[in-house]
Amino acid sequence: MEPSEDQYLIINALDTLMLLSANFYDEDTGDWYINTSSPILPNAILQQNGDIVPISWRNE
């Protein structure tokens, strides 16, 4: 599965703002796992539709 345009836009914005610490794209699920320097959302999943959810929400 290829990353969506929404995902690319968000990743580029986070990178431009120097908030993106690390990222990994999972080709099987289409999810992009991100680490940011934000204390509010340090670890999150960027879904295909552009939604950003904390990793803990994904497990519930």
Image: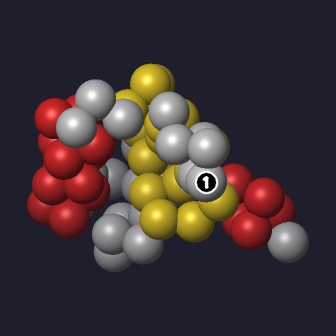
Percent of width and height locating residue 48: 36, 66
Rate crowding at label 1 as few (under 14), some (14 to 19) or many (20 or more) other CA atoms within 10 Å. Answer: few
Residue ID for mark 1: 40
- When asked about the image quadrant of residue 58, the answer is bottom right
| Residue drawn at the location 42% of the way across and 72% of the way down | 51
**Front residue (pair 40, 13):** 40
Between 10 and 58, the one lying in front of the other is 10
Residue at the (16%, 35%) spot, across then down: 16
Question: In the visual, does 3 lie left or right of 35?
Answer: left
Vertical position of residue 22 compared to residue 1: above or below: above
Taking the view exactly as shown, the residue that stands out farthest to the front is 39
Above or below, comparing residue 2 to residue 25 in the picture:
below
Q: Name the kind of residue labelled 1 in the image.
A: Ile
The image shows residue 56 at horizontal and vertical percentages of: 78, 59
Residue 27 is at least partly visible in this image: yes
Residue 22, percent across and down? 45, 25
Quadrant location of residue 40?
Answer: bottom right
Where residue 57 sits: x, y (%)?
Answer: 74, 68
40 to the left or right of 9: right
Residue reaching furthest right?
Answer: 60
Q: Residue at x 20, y 64 (%)?
A: 6
Q: Quadrant of the C terminus?
A: bottom right
Secondary structure beneath dot 1 equals loop
- Color scheme of the displayed model: secondary structure
Does residue 2 appear in this view? Answer: no
